[in-house]
Image (spheres, rainbow, N blue to C red):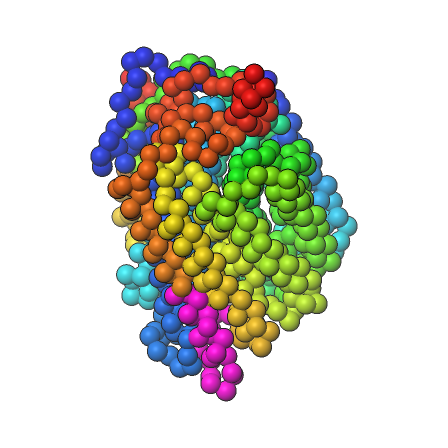
């Protein structure tokens, strides 16, 4: 049994609306956080569709320029503060206690507080749309002086700042609980070098959240003071000062939105190759170096300001290729010689690595100051970060979603609908974001609501808009798959994939305190694979 | 024991962060730019120290439900939103936090 077994008599898990508000079980909190984040994802996606509709042809068709500013601000903010970051931490909240053999997460009340802060933060941010001047409209970065009280007046921007602040604080609390669980609640035998790879990715993710996010809290707090008459960023160095603080959060958060999905994809690849992950210790070392380097590259967002040490940040940015390359070696090394099964999670995992490569390689381009001067604030940057965050992270998220859905719900997702979702999303993603590289190369600036027919950008923009429609269709297929499977899904059983880590050693869905049966001995990072190998020998 | 081993890895990460920050001090860079990496190293070392000081888990009652987190989050939200909607929200938020603390104290005493 795990260490924190419940005292008798067992608790009654609160149900219904009251349970949804005050229940502290980490699995329930994580499920709710995933549901809320996915809701924000759909809302942010609708804004993206409206933006793509506006850009499909020259001229202003469906919104005003200020309306468009609000749309791209709330699209980016929703996706980063309210969807990818929280959903990455939600995966850790659900899975880490199970993977380390713990009965509960450390500090469940703090964990629940984090969840509610994300929910209330998101609601606060979106409430801005109801104010007289509309929602926040200074981009997800709220760069100064664009975000000051003169350039973006009104309550909407204040609510945006308050919402982002609350959501970031919530994610910090959630991350603290996940990290503390890894530190203090591992089952006997599970040393740090026997942690599953996903849990290792959560170690570095949580460290980054706890060290980088305070800079955002400080930046937004000072910005709020500045907007209310206390001169903080006014003056010649103010805009750069704000950016120093913001980007110290703003770049690490990209990796907070990346590492958990690397972990998910590597676990999926190992399971569907029937092999242990190749080079486990190398992965651990590369994750530690990768995470530290990603805390040291933030200045490349400021190359064109002339206010940072460009040489230093160009060097550290390019060094990222080494640990990133090691992750790829692990993925490919695991596949080689494996008994590969192309189920839906495996398709998403492989696509994650392939498509992220496009984002990563275009990162080499914008990580070079001379080239970045050309690409800065163009659609090249938009294409680059959508290939990392959407074509990369979101595909890794879906790899994890299809893989762990049976564990969370007890039923399998439909394989046919899963593959339809995969192919539609792959086609839609590339039809949407690949043209943006060419638009940027042709000089189309980002964050513009319109262009003229003489610019010659309509064909590529229309193509990207069609791609966005295909993405929407893919998401509809996923929603239908989830709904159909929840209503009439095939029961999954404890371990439908013949997986390797401890979460598969319990029922699906797991009981209140995670493990009702004795855990297998932990002699490696793949205790269930050890067990099967021992049984095969016996 | 578990915390000690985890602390070692956290401290190792702090060391890598510190090593990466050293060249920034040799380069021409801004004061705030230089200050942030050491601050991150410091936070990481605090996390390592907490991991080191963490007690071994014992069998104890875990809260199955608690109203305090909802109230604290609601209180903080109202206080933050007060910048936009007025000081009344800060007062209401403050009351929410006070009620949450009372609820928390009662839960722990039960």
The front one of A462 and A316 is A462
The front one of A108 and A32 is A32
Instruction: Report the residue at 33% width, 20% height from top.
Output: B108
Instruction: Report the residue at 59% width, 34% height from top.
Output: A275
Q: Residue furthest bottom?
A: A454
Q: Which residues are magenta?
A: A446-469
Residue A243 in the image: state x and y as whole percent.
56, 57
Identify the main secondary structure in magenta.
Answer: helix
Q: Determine if residue B61 is in view.
A: yes
Looking at the rendering, which quadrant does residue B96 occupy?
top left
The front one of A262 and B8 is A262
Residue A414 in the image: state x and y as whole percent.
36, 45
Q: Residue A239, relative to residue A38: is it above or below?
A: below
The front one of A317 and A486 is A486
Instruction: Report the residue at 64% width, 37% height from top.
Output: A278
User: In which quadrant of the rendered image does the C terminus of chain A lie?
Assistant: top right
User: In which quadrant of the rendered image does the N terminus of chain A lie?
Assistant: top left
Q: Residue A210, relative to residue A505: is it above or below?
A: below
């Amino acid at each position: 049994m795990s260490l924190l077994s419940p005292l008798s008599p067992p608790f009654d898990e609160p149900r219904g609306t009251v349970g949804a508000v005050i229940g502290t079980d980490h699995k329930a909190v994580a499920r709710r956080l995933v549901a809320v984040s996915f809701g924000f994802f759909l809302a942010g996606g609708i804004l993206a569709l409206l933006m793509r509709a506006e850009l499909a042809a020259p001229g202003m068709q469906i919104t005003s320029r200020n309306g468009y500013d609000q749309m791209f601000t709330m699209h980016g903010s929703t996706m980063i503060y309210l969807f990818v970051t929280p959903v990455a931490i939600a995966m850790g909240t659900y899975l880490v206690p199970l993977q380390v053999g713990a009965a509960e997460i450390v500090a469940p009340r703090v964990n629940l507080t984090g969840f509610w802060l994300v929910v209330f933060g998101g609601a606060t941010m979106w409430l801005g749309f109801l104010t007289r001047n509309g929602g926040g409209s200074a981009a997800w970065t709220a760069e100064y002086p664009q975000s000051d009280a003169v350039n973006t007046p009104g309550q909407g921007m204040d609510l945006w700042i308050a919402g982002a602040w609350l959501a970031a604080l919530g994610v910090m609390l959630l991350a603290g609980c996940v990290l503390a669980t890894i530190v203090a609640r591992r089952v006997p035998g599970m040393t740090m070098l026997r942690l599953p790879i996903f849990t290792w990715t959560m170690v570095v993710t949580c460290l980054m959240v706890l060290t980088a996010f305070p800079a955002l809290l400080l930046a937004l707090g000072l910005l709020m003071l500045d907007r209310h008459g206390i001169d903080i960023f006014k003056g010649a160095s103010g805009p750069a000062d704000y950016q120093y603080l913001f980007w110290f959060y703003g770049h690490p958060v990209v990796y907070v939105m990346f590492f958990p999905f690397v972990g998910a994809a590597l676990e999926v690849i190992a399971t569907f190759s029937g092999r242990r992950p190749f080079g486990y210790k190398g992965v651990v070392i590369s994750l530690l170096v990768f995470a530290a380097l990603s805390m040291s590259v933030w200045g490349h967002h400021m190359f064109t300001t002339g206010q940072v040490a460009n040489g230093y940040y160009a060097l550290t940015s390019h060094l990222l290729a080494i640990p990133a390359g090691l992750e790829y070696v692990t993925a490919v090394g695991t596949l080689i010689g494996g008994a590969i099964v192309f189920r839906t999670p495996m398709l998403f995992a492989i696509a994650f690595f392939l498509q992220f490569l496009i984002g990563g390689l275009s990162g080499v381009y914008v990580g070079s100051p001379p080239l970045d001067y050309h690409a800065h604030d163009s659609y090249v940057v938009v294409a680059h970060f959508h290939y990392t965050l959407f074509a990369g992270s979101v595909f890794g998220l879906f790899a994890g979603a299809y893989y762990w859905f049976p564990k969370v719900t007890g039923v399998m997702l439909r394989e046919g609908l899963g593959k339809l979702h995969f192919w539609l999303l792959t086609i839609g993603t590339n039809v949407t974001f690949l043209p943006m590289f060419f638009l940027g190369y042709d000089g189309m600036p980002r964050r513009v609501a319109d262009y003229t027919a003489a610019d010659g950008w309509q064909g590529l923009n229309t193509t990207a808009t069609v791609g966005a429609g295909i993405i929407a269709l893919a998401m509809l297929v996923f929603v239908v798959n989830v709904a159909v499977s929840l209503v009439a899904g095939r029961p999954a059983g404890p371990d439908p994939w013949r997986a390797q880590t401890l979460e598969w050693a319990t029922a699906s869905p797991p009981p209140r305190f995670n493990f009702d049966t004795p855990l297998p001995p932990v002699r490696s990072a793949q205790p269930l694979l050890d067990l099967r190998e021992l049984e095969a020998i016996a | 024991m578990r915390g000690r081993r985890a602390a070692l890895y956290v401290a190792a990460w702090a060391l890598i962060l510190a090593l990466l920050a050293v060249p920034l001090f040799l380069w021409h860079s801004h004061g705030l730019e230089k200050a942030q990496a050491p601050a991150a190293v410091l936070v990481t070392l605090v996390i390592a120290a907490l991991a080191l000081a963490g007690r071994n888990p014992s069998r104890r009652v875990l809260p199955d439900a608690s109203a305090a987190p909802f109230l604290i989050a609601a209180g903080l939200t109202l206080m933050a939103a007060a910048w936009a909607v007025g000081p009344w929200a800060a007062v209401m938020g403050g009351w929410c936090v006070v009620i949450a603390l009372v609820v928390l104290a009662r839960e722990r005493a039960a």
